[in-house]
Image: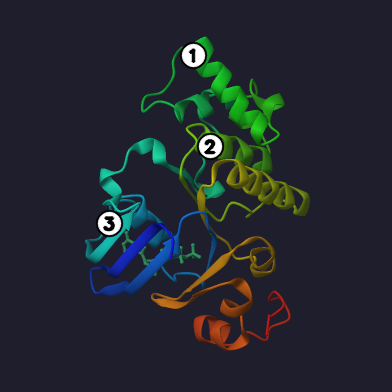
Amino acid sequence: MGALAVQTYDLGVRFGDFQALYGINLEIPQGSFVAIVGPNGAGKSTLLKVLLGLDPGNLRDGEARLVGRAEVFGQAPKALPASWVGYVPQVKSFDRSFPALALEVVVSGLRRAWPFSIGPREREVALAALAQVGAAHLAERPLGRLSGGELQRVYLARSLVRQPKLLMLDEPATGVDVVGEADLYRHLEAYQRQSGATILMITHDWEAASHHASHVLLLNRTVIAFDPPGLALRHECLSRAFGHVGHAHDAPVIR
Ligand SMILES: Nc1ncnc2c1ncn2[C@@H]1O[C@H](COP(=O)(O)OP(=O)(O)OP(=O)(O)O)[C@@H](O)[C@H]1O
């Protein structure tokens, strides 16, 4: 196997008495596009938080205990240079009332502090990142005047501005229309072609995942499957992850 972007060794996360993740052993090759799929509460966001080097319990009360180990590019996530990893949080966690322009949000991805004044070089780099996701025209727009899909693009530009080697996205297509979702995949694939980056993306859209991802990580507190989409999304794997999967609203099942 080639070089790995992510490797985990019997990784587990416990919140108080609740075992959110257990026995996670993963080897994710560099350059792969991984769709992370699983039911609500399966531990998808928790896994991304661990890979980001965040305390998985930092968003809510409760004691979080991590067992096992995760490595990103052979290092502990917390030890990685910040520029190696990009992250796009769930759109519902964005605060649109914050009085900022799209350009400022993107520049904030270049710095650790809020950019009260933006230098010409930063402006150029941020505009290029916005252009990369088809959003250059939004640069001077206040966040409060962006649609969900536009806001998503601005945060995608923010995550790309430092050209990360690993890009993690938490349900980026939620609340985005079909055209917006197709655009999102187009931008991600273009970035991946240009940079060779590894992409991990949580999604509830199995069908899109099966078209775009190189691998699907089917998760339900532990790894149900980590395989190319055609294998991971087989009926038996989906049944193990989701229980009953024959409902009319479910995405088509790949057998
Ligand atoms: N800080 C915390 N304290 C206590 N329990 C938590 C905490 N964070 C997450 N959990 C629990 O851990 C489980 C996994 O949560 P997580 O957000 O990782 O799931 P998910 O697969 O991303 O779900 P969804 O698809 O609904 O976003 C859930 O049951 C959740 O309630």
Residue 144's image quarter?
Answer: top right
Q: Residue at x 44, y 76 (%)?
A: 220
Alpha-carbon neighbours of circle 1 within 10 Å: few (<14), some, or many (≥20)?
some
Q: Which mark's residue is nearer the viewer, 3 or 1?
A: 1
> Measured along the vertical axis of the image, is residue 170 above or below residue 100?
below
Alpha-carbon neighbours of circle 3 within 10 Å: few (<14), some, or many (≥20)?
few
Quadrant of the picture in which ligand 1 is shown: bottom left
Percent of width and height locating residue 37? 54, 69
First of labels 1, 2 by sequence position? 1
Identify the disc placed on residue 61: 3
Q: Is residue 89 left or right of residue 252?
A: left
Percent of width and height locating residue 196? 54, 47
| Mark 3 lies within 8 Å of ligand 1 (Cβ measured) | yes
Q: Judge whether residue 140 can be spotted in this image.
A: yes
In the rendered image, which quarter contains the C terminus? Answer: bottom right
Q: Which mark's residue is nearer the viewer, 1 or 2?
A: 2
Disc 1 element: loop
Q: Residue at x 44, y 15 (%)?
A: 116
Disc 2 element: helix
Amino acid type assigned to the residue bearing label 3 in the image: Asp
Q: Residue at x 30, y 50 (%)?
A: 77
Q: How is the image coloured?
A: rainbow
Q: Is residue 175 left or right of residue 126?
A: right
Q: Which residue is mark 1?
A: 118
> Measured along the vertical axis of the image, is residue 167 above or below residue 107?
below
In three-dimensional space, the C-alpha distance between marks 3 and 1, rounded to whole angstroms, equals 37 Å
Q: Is residue 201 left or right of residue 15?
A: right
Alpha-carbon neighbours of circle 2 within 10 Å: few (<14), some, or many (≥20)?
many
Amino acid type assigned to the residue bearing label 1 in the image: Ile
Q: Which residue is mark 2?
A: 160
Residue 145's image quarter?
Answer: top right
